[in-house]
Image: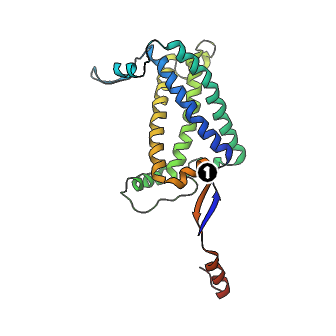
């Protein structure tokens, strides 16, 4: 027997979906800003293995010569990103939802079981409540990453006015490296998140939109017979 059960509150769903387009604009506009000084890459013994980003990438997205536009969009949507994230944190604290998000004692161990199950290496389904161990770690990490982006962003945006934040971040250049690394982290998180949603199925995706999920429950007739027979299952 199927039963409709509430899973996600409205405010949780609101902040979740608002964050996607806001973060997309932040990354898009951030590329325009990064273009003005695209200094990062991965090199070994002086040989560049990966360059962030190759020339064709800039040409494809028409990024060159759009620095002022990128700064305008980035600093505007930064406020939406900050307010939306702050609203989500306040909600989780006062609603008590943080208890379901914070990693527990065995979360890191159980996260490996989730990974092995997703890779079809392990058949046994790992412990699953509202969020499994891997989700707890990932969702907590993304909150910390958001805070890190705001802090390092302020250090880059106003290194003189917020000199103490810039100092805490290890200086302007190191703050910029952290800010860039966090952006790469968002992209990787998004790709993994999409795969996880696809693996979880339509019911899970629907619950993030409507707030409800459809679950299998014990038929009432069977429960009634159990009571009449005086037995318990």
- Residue 221: image location, x then y, percent: 63, 79
| Residue depicted at 54% across the width and 27% down the height | 25
Q: Is residue 173 visible?
A: no
- Residue 171: image location, x then y, percent: 52, 18
Which of the 4 quarters of the picture holds residue 51? Answer: top left
Which of the 4 quarters of the picture holds residue 38? Answer: top left
Residue 96 vertical placement versus 227 (above, below) = above
Residue 151 vertical placement versus 186 (above, below) = above
- Residue 39: image location, x then y, percent: 40, 17
Closer to the camera in the image, 32 or 188:
32
Q: Quadrant of the N terminus?
A: bottom right
Which of the 4 quarters of the picture holds residue 47? Answer: top left
Total numbered labels placed on residues in the image: 1
Closer to the camera in the image, 1 or 158:
1
Q: Quadrant of the C terminus?
A: bottom right
| Residue depicted at 55% across the width and 24% down the height | 152
Is 87 on the left-hand or right-hand side of 214? right
Closer to the camera in the image, 31 or 65:
65
Colour convention of the picture: rainbow
Q: Residue furthest right?
A: 94
Which residue is label 1 attached to? 100
Residue 5 vertical placement versus 74 (above, below) = below
Q: Is residue 95 visible?
A: yes
| Residue depicted at 64% across the width and 41% down the height | 14
Closer to the camera in the image, 217 or 169:
217
SS of the residue at dot 1?
helix
Binning the other alpha carbons within 10 Å of mark 1 as few (below 14), some (14 to 19) or many (20 upward) gives: some
């Amino acid at each position: 027997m199927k039963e409709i059960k509430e899973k996600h509150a409205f405010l949780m769903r609101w902040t979740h979906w608002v964050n996607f387009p806001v973060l997309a604009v932040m990354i898009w506009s951030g590329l325009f800003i990064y273009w003005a000084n695209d200094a990062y890459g991965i090199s070994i013994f002086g040989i560049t293995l990966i360059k962030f980003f190759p020339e064709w990438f800039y040409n494809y997205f028409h990024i060159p010569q759009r620095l002022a536009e990128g700064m305008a969009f980035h600093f505007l949507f930064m406020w939406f990103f900050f307010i939306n994230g702050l609203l989500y944190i306040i909600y989780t604290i006062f609603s008590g939802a943080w208890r379901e998000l914070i990693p527990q004692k065995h979360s890191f161990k159980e996260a490996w079981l989730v990974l092995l199950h997703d890779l079809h290496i392990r058949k046994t389904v790992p412990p699953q409540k509202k969020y499994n161990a891997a989700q707890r770690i990932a969702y907590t990490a993304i909150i910390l990453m958001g805070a890190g982006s705001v802090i390092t962003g302020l250090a880059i945006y106003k290194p003189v006015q917020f000199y103490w934040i810039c100092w805490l971040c290890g200086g302007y250049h190191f703050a910029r490296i952290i800010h860039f690394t966090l952006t790469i982290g968002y992209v990787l998180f998004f790709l993994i998140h999409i795969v996880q949603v696809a693996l979880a199925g339509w019911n899970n995706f629907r619950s993030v939109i409507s707030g409800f999920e459809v679950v299998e429950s014990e038929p009432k007739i069977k429960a009634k017979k159990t009571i009449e027979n005086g037995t318990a299952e």
